[in-house]
Amino acid sequence: MAAARIAAVFFVMLIPAAGAQQSSPIQITVQAVDPTGMAIPSAHVRVDPSPGAMKSDVTTDGRGEAVLELPAGSYTLWIDAPGFERWSRRIEVRGAESQTLRAKLEVGQVSGPPLVAWQPEIPLESPQPIFLALQPAGTLSPLLSSRAKKRQ
C-alpha cells in the first residue's frame, strides 16, 4: 500500500513537468525578403499578443532574419520596413521543433526623407584648367575623332 502511495505521488509530480515541457518556447526564425528574394535588413518584427515575458519585438539582421521564442499558441506577426508595405499573417505555433517563416514584403510607397542621401564630392576648383575649342559663329563644324578624320 505504501508503495502504491509513493508511485501515485511520483506520478502526480511528473504531470506538471510534462505540461511545462509542452509550453516551453519554440524558436521561430522569421526571414524578411523583397519580391526578388533579397534580404531586408533592419525590418521591424512584432508579435501580437505579446507572449508575456518573451521578447516579441525584434529587428532583422543583415541576412533579413529575426529569431523569436514563442510558446505554443496563435499569434499575429507584423513586419514593417521602410519602402515596403506592412506584412502581417496569423500564425499557429505548435510542436517542439524550431520553425522558419519566409515573409515576402511588397514594395510600397516611400514617404518622408530619402532612405539614402548621397551627393558626390564636387571640387569647387578644378585641379587642372579645362580648355574648350571655340570657333567663330557660322563656321561651326563637328569635332571629329581621329577615326572619323581618317574616313574622310
Image (cartoon, rainbow, N blue to C red):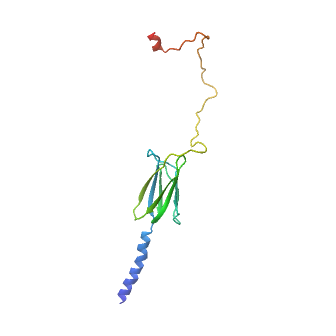
For residue 46, above or below residue 130: below
Camera-nearest residue between 106 and 124: 106
Residue drawn at (38%, 86%), measured in percent from left and top?
5
Q: Quarter-wise, where is residue 134 in the image?
A: top right
Q: Nearer the viewer, residue 139 or 55?
A: 139
Q: Nearer the viewer, residue 70 or 4?
A: 70
Viewer-nearest residue: 94 or 109: 109
Q: Position of residue 53 (x, y in %)?
A: 53, 66
Query: Image height check: is 47 above or below 16?
Result: above
Which residue shows up at 44% across the image and 56% down it?
A: 29
For the view shown, which residue lies furthest in the bottom direction?
1
Residue under the point 41% across and 60% down: 98
Question: x, y percentage for residue 126?
Answer: 61, 25
User: Residue 116: percent from the left, percent from the top?
Assistant: 56, 41
Q: Position of residue 97 (x, y in %)?
A: 39, 62
Q: On the image, which quarter does residue 110 sit in?
A: top right
Look at the image and tell me in which quarter the N terminus lies: bottom left
Against 66, residue 71 (above or below) is below
Q: Quadrant of residue 125?
A: top right
Residue visible at 44% across and 72% down in the picture: 20
